[in-house]
Structure formats: C-alpha cells, structure tokens
C-alpha cells in the first residue's frame, strides 16, 4: 500500500477547490427595466368647445422588460391610499396598475 503525503493531499484539495470555484454557476444578470408613471386627466366633452374643468383623474404605474419570465412580480410604492400596490403582469413583458378615478 502506498502512503499519501500531506503535500499530495494538499495539492489534490487545492486542485479540487480551484475546479469548484471555476465551475460554480454564475448568477443570472437582471433584465433591464423601463418604468413608467402617468398621471391622467379625464375630460368629458359635451359641446364643440374644449372642456374647462376635468371631472376626474387617474394614474398608471408600470414597467416593461425584454425577456419573458425575467420577473414574476412587481410592486409600486407611492404616497397615498392603497400603497404599496402590486402590479399585474398584463403581458409577457409588461407590469401595469391603473388607479380608480378620483376628483
């Protein structure tokens, strides 16, 4: 039976450690996000002239990204009632939330 020296064992563990470090999976890069926030004014035009006072407002918060499946949930935080708000995945690469009408 052959004897194993401490130096040979150290070399084997060092080699295994280097291979392990090189073979570890790399973390996935995050997909770029394009965020959008819109404040909307709603007018009712009941005559040929432009409406003067808007009766309602609402806002939208959303995000777009390139690769379907990159994100499965999104949340928006804003000042006011209902915050934070979960955004709905409305398409493979789109999150969106539309507020209720307010005056």
Image (cartoon, rainbow, N blue to C red):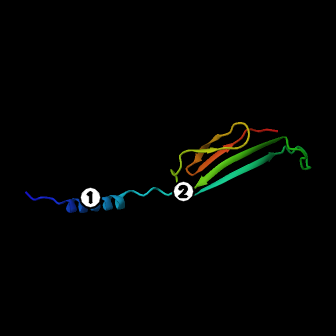
Q: Is residue 42 left or right of residue 2?
A: right
Where's residue 71, x and y in %?
A: 53, 49
| Residue at x 45% of width, y 56% of height | 27
Q: Nearer the viewer, residue 43 or 78?
A: 78
Q: Is residue 18 left or right of residue 71?
A: left
Q: Is residue 99 left or right of residue 3?
A: right
Tag of residue 91: none
The secondary element bearing badge 2 is classed as loop
The quadrant of the picture occupied by the N terminus is bottom left
Location of residue 10 with respect to 49 vertically, above or below: below
Q: Which badge, 2 or 1, comes first in the chain's sequence?
A: 1
| Residue at x 72% of width, y 36% of height | 81
Estimate how packed mark 2 is, as few (under 14), some (14 to 19) or many (20 or more) residues with alpha carbons within 10 Å: some
The secondary element bearing badge 1 is classed as helix
Where's residue 97, x and y in %?
A: 66, 43
Q: CA distance from mark 2 to mark 1?
A: 37 Å
Where's residue 2, x and y in %?
A: 10, 59
Q: Nearer the viewer, residue 78 or 40?
A: 78
Check contact, mark 2 vs mark 1: CB within 8 A. Answer: no
> Within the image, what quadrant is residue 19 found in?
bottom left
- Mark 2 or mark 1: which is in front? 1
The quadrant of the picture occupied by the C terminus is top right
Q: Nearer the viewer, residue 47 or 24?
A: 24
| Residue at x 74% of width, y 39% of height | 80
Tag of residue 31: 2
Residue placed furthest toward the top:
81
> Within the image, what quadrant is residue 12 found in?
bottom left
**Residue topped by disc 1:** 13
């Amino acid at each position: 039976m052959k004897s194993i020296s401490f130096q040979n064992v150290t070399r084997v563990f060092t080699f295994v450690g280097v291979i392990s470090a090189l073979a570890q999976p790399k973390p996935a890069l995050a997909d770029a996000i394009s965020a959008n926030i819109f404040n909307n004014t709603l007018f009712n035009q009941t005559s040929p002239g432009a409406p003067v006072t808007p009766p309602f407002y609402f806002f939208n918060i959303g995000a777009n990204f390139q690769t379907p499946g990159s994100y499965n949930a999104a949340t928006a935080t804003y000042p006011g009632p209902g915050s934070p708000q979960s955004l709905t995945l409305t398409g493979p690469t789109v999150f969106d939330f539309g507020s209720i009408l307010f005056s």
